[in-house]
């Protein structure tokens, strides 16, 4: 299978900040690559370079065999982008938004209109299609934005955090839509902050931090590095930490990790349910009161902890915060 | 939901920019901007309140003080100035519209499409001409109500309106550049106020130039807002009867002088704005 997206050694600096620090990636035709990383990792920067919105300081990238720096217009006619913040015109109806995008892809009047109606239907927006998109919910806007990316049936789709900021139901709907695309054989580059999402949607995952790939593999490979299930508990009283630590250590198959000022402990376990019962029993015997205890699946934080020894930190980022504000304002309308 | 089986044929593969696609794309963008007038007609009301207020304030409050002998003639004199001020201020719209599109990420969408790089700006400046046409019509009607009359031929008057629109169009390109440079609607509004307000007040838009102290008068004589005002005032036939015409070349040849400014502004700011748009990122 040939690689539709190939990037090597991408570097992008913003003054002191190195947003991308030599990123390599490949997306074979018909597969989904998940770019997984915390806020500020460089996901959007990578997406912007691959979609010709930004020029890399160093490195090369091709999309469908076309160099993004040398022939950006050629790349643009072969990609569909749904950015991190839904880029729909709030004064236009859903139909008008899609029709406009079709015209700007050069589809012509008739085809653009047909395509707009088709997509509204597919994305469950047919009823809302003739209302200004200002009246849409956050989830509907995201779907409309995704529909806009599909207007010209591009061979490559790029979705930047398609579910960030959506509520549980809207997120599920978005996942359904993306899964149908994936089963239809689209080539997709997807960024996300959620391991769960990458696990569900991506064939292949690259974990990035500080603009660099720190791990690469399938979801299963990554999880086996991190271990399957974890027992996590929070003690009520700081004085009990030592006892709780000991209880957890007897069943743990990894080091016990502490966070939350030492009151939160977690560790990998095998046979989760039995391990949990065991820990509970020992805590009971030691007379330790816990605020919370449970089994959970590994998260991005666990992957990070395992790979880098630190949790995925939220970087202070004014630009991002500003955009976030704009996003939430729009979302609440 | 039906199955989303995407065909692999890229419908837009290899779309290239030609003069025809520049025009087609600009038209799509202009239409998109005009839909906003339809959806948010309040905008038009706001644009019109201040010019109508100006007509009424100047005509009835200051009119008697400025030309006590002939307040009616002053009202006619004033209208061309108000027209000029309003259409020049209309350019703020271009900047604010682009800034808003940047803030909302729409520009990113456009920049990721295989469309002409110039179309977003050509479409925007073109649709803002429509705003100015609408405001001119409404202001002209208000003017007629307060006693303004066209004293020349209809053809001359239309030429006057056309010159106002063409000059404002050039100014739109200046504000387009500012809008891409400073993508904040608030900053654009304040900046344009700070620049355009003195340009319109240190001009012959509201008062005859004889009353100005010399340095200000020289600035005003060569200020293109004065010349576009003078040109349309001449074409409407609305000069004050007792006022001595300025002998500055710019005001002796206001149409030509205004057109020179128009061309120069577009030649400088259109390429600057388009270059800025290509590199811009929100
Ligand atoms: N326009 C910009 N100017 C300055 N710094 C930026 C800009 N865009 C992104 N950055 C910085 O680059 C880093 C990567 O950002 P980004 O690619 O947006 O991360 P992500 O999408 O993974 O959250 C962050 O530290 C961010 O602050
Ligand atoms: Mg991002």
Image (cartoon, rainbow, N blue to C red):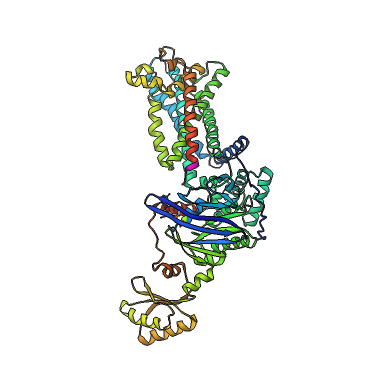
Is residue B92 something that shows in the picture?
no
Write the residue at 52% across / 64% down: A205
Q: Is residue A269 left or right of residue A243?
A: right
Write the residue at 34% across / 19% down: B212
Write the start and end of the magenta stretch as one range. B278-282
Quarter of the view holding residue A244: bottom left
Outermost bottom residue = A285
Quarter of the view holding residue A42: bottom left
Q: How far across and down, in percent of the image, does residue B39 sit?
A: 55, 42
Outermost left residue = A239
Compared to residue A29, the image places residue A303 above or below, namely below
Quarter of the view holding residue B197: top left
Q: How far across and down, in percent of the image, does residue B184 sit?
A: 43, 43
Q: Nearer the viewer, residue B32 or B20?
A: B20
Q: Nearer the viewer, residue A317 or B175?
A: A317
Q: How far across and down, in percent of the image, does residue B12 sit?
A: 64, 47
Quadrant in the picture for the N terminus of chain B: bottom right
Q: Main secondary structure of the magenta part?
A: loop
Is residue A119 something that shows in the picture?
yes
Magenta stretch holds residue A38:
no
Write the residue at 47% across / 57% down: A23
Compared to residue B104, the image places residue A253 above or below, namely below
């Amino acid at each position: 299978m040939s690689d539709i997206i190939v990037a090597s050694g991408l570097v992008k600096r913003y003054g002191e900040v190195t947003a991308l620090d030599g990123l390599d990636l490949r997306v074979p035709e018909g597969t989904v690559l998940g770019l997984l990383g915390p806020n500020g990792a460089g996901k959007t920067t990578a997406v912007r370079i691959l979609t010709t919105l930004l020029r890399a300081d160093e490195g090369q990238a091709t999309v469908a065999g076309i160099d993004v720096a040398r022939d950006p217009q050629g790349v643009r006619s072969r990609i569909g982008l749904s950015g991190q913040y839904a880029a729909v015109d709030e004064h236009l109806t859903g139909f008008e938004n899609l029709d406009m995008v079709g015209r700007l892809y050069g589809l012509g009047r008739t085809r653009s209109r047909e395509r707009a109606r088709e997509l509204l239907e597919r994305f469950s927006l047919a009823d809302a299609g003739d209302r200004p998109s200002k009246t849409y919910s956050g989830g509907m806007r995201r779907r409309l934005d995704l529909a806009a990316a599909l207007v010209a049936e591009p061979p490559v789709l790029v979705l930047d955090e398609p579910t960030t900021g959506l509520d549980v139901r809207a997120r599920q709907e978005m996942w359904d839509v993306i899964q149908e695309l994936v089963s239809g054989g689209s080539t997709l580059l997807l960024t996300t902050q959620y391991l769960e999402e990458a696990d569900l949607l991506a064939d292949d995952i690259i974990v990035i931090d500080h603009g660099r790939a720190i791990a690469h593999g399938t979801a299963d490979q990554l999880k086996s590095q991190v271990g399957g299930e974890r027992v996590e508990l929070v003690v009520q009283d700081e004085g009990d930490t030592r006892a709780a630590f000991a209880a957890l250590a007897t069943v743990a198959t990894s080091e016990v990790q502490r966070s939350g000022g030492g009151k939160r402990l977690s560790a990998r376990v095998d046979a989760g349910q039995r391990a949990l019962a065991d820990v509970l029993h020992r805590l009971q015997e030691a007379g330790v009161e816990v605020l919370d205890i449970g089994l959970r699946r590994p998260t991005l934080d666990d992957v990070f902890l395992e790979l880098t020894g630190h949790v995925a930190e939220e970087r202070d980022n004014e630009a991002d915060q500003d955009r976030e504000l704009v996003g939430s304002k729009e979302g609440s309308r | 939901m039906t199955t989303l089986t995407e065909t692999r044929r890229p419908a837009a593969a290899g779309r290239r920019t030609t003069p025809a696609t520049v025009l087609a794309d600009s038209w799509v963008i202009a239409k998109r901007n005009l839909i906003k007038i339809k959806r948010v007609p309040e905008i038009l009301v706001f644009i019109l309140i201040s010019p109508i207020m100006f007509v009424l304030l100047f005509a009835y409050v200051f009119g008697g003080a400025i030309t006590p002998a002939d307040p009616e003639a002053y009202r006619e004199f004033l209208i061309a100035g108000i027209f000029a001020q309003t259409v020049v201020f209309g350019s703020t719209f271009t900047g604010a519209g682009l800034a808003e599109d940047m803030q909302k990420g729409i520009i990113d969408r456009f920049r990721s499409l295989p469309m002409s790089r110039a179309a977003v700006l050509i479409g925007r400046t073109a649709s803002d001409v429509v705003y100015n046409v609408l405001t001119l019509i409404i202001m002209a009607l208000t003017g007629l109500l307060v006693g303004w009359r066209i004293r020349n031929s209809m053809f001359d008057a239309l030429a006057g309106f056309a010159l106002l629109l063409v000059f404002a169009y050039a100014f739109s390109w200046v504000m387009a550049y500012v809008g891409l440079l400073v993508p904040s609607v608030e900053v654009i509004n304040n900046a344009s106020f700070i620049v355009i307000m003195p340009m319109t007040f240190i001009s012959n838009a509201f008062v005859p130039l004889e009353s100005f102290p010399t340095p200000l008068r020289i600035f005003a004589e060569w200020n293109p807002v004065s010349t576009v005002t003078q040109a349309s005032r001449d074409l409407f036939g609305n000069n004050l009867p007792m006022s001595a015409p300025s002998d500055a070349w710019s005001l002796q040849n206001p149409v030509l002088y205004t057109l020179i400014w128009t061309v120069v502004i577009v030649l400088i700011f259109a390429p600057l704005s388009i270059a800025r748009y290509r590199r811009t990122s929100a």
